[in-house]
Image: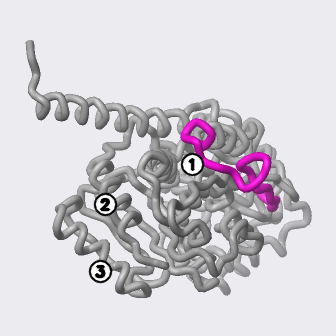
Amino acid sequence: MKLSIATLFLVCFSNLFAQDSTYTKKIIETLCSKKMAGRGYVNKGDQLASNFISKEFKSIGLKSFGNDYFQEFDFSVNTFPGEIELLYNGKRLVPGVDYLVDPSCPSINFKGIAKFMSIQSLDSVNQYDIWGGKVKAAVIDTFNNKYFIDAAINLKHYVSDPRNQLIIKLTSDKLTWSCSQKQSKVPVIILRSDIFNRDSISFFEIKVKSNFIKKNVSRNVIGYIEGSKFKDSFIYVTAHYDHLGMMGNKTVFPGANDNASGIAMMLNLAKYFQINKPKYSIVFIAFSGEEAGLIGSHYYVEHPLTPLSDIKFLVNIDLMGNGADGVMVVNGTLNPSEFQLLKSINDKEKYLPEIKIRGKAANSDHYWFAQSGVPAFFFYLMGPYPFYHDVNDKASALPLTNFDQAFSLFQSFISKLQIQ
């Protein structure tokens, strides 16, 4: 059967599109695999992820600023590499589903009765002699309770041996975890309030093994494409690859939307511009330490591989899992001409249903660059997706709605930037 040139073009384009989609899914699935251990600081998850991204940079053909693509830095972090176990009145609860260990929690081996107390104000803490007698743990109802943090700090003054004491914080909110650069003295467990029965005796058996690392060595992964016309003027494309890692030796936080999806978008852009050479040099950075406090990007700004004054624009990418409702542009109000360029491209091509604008926000790795005078946008897609910082943010859960359309918008925007 003979095919016309137009038909052949459409077939080839279709095959290329399918291949791009396959590549995106491969990147996300790999970064979210059990081997990567949630890309945190248990079982060398962050190291494995950075090695994988480095290999992708090399495969794409990105240049490095040194002998490799890595920029090392260190920071403190509290981790949970050992067994985590919680039994409530003899019933074994599921970590990440029924409860969370507070990110700053120290090790604990507790077995005993927990007393329920309702804190209405900081002063009411003094009414409870919870650390005396047989009661060594407090269950605190913190729903709509703004006093919890102050109360927990105040309670620790009652503790003669913090390793044998415990605060159980009830919550009706979705269980959402995070990282901590510190380890507290008083152990805290966050428990779903619908599990706890206030009218019955509360007997808990809890084991937590934590490991505070004073100097955890992590790595930014950095590569670049040299511009065809303006080699010393740089556009930066960034995304963080780290996530929360593991809470214990079994519970993994995969981080598909946050931010394996952003790394997949960044790598797709790297592949595109490696083939379609840009006028300006483009630096691609996969940051670590974002979830622990934007640490990798902060380190880079203090130790840049190109002068910050030569960075003409930065595009930071996060949360690319669902763009059904469009894209949010953080720092859009700070860079009106670039925002108008982005909007005009979308108005013409109809890539996404809406381009929303925000002002300054310290919510991702663009922040330290913007603070240093580098014009920057932070893009995140908007659409229904219920999983964030939890055990359900898996590769299989991502719809990737409008992912390809967002890619087309971003590459067109980067290509049309006039920054010299």
3 vs 1, front mark? 3
Read off the magenta span. Answer: 57-77
Residue denoted by label 3: 340
**Amino acid, disc 1:** Tyr
Q: Which residue is mark 2?
A: 409
Q: Is residue 409 visible?
A: yes
Residue 373 percent coordinates (x, y): 59, 85
- Residue 341, image quadrant: bottom left
* Relative horizontal placement of residue 114, taking residue 400 as reference (left or right): right
Q: In the drawing, what numbered circle is on residue 342?
A: none
Q: At x 41% / y 50%, what residue is drawn?
A: 276
Of pointers 2 and 3, the one earlier in the residue sequence? 3
Q: Quadrant of the N terminus?
A: top left
* Residue 69 vs residue 192, the one in the foreground: 69
Q: Give the amino acid type for the residue marked by disc 2 in the picture.
A: Leu
User: Which residue is rendered at x = 72% and y = 70% of the image?
Assistant: 304
Q: Position of residue 200 (x, y in %)?
A: 55, 50
* Residue beneath disc 1: 99
Q: Indicate the quadrant where residue 109 lies.
A: top right
- 191 inside magenta stretch: no
Which of 375 and 90 lies nearest the eye of the viewer?
375
Position in image of residue 355 (x %, y %): 27, 71
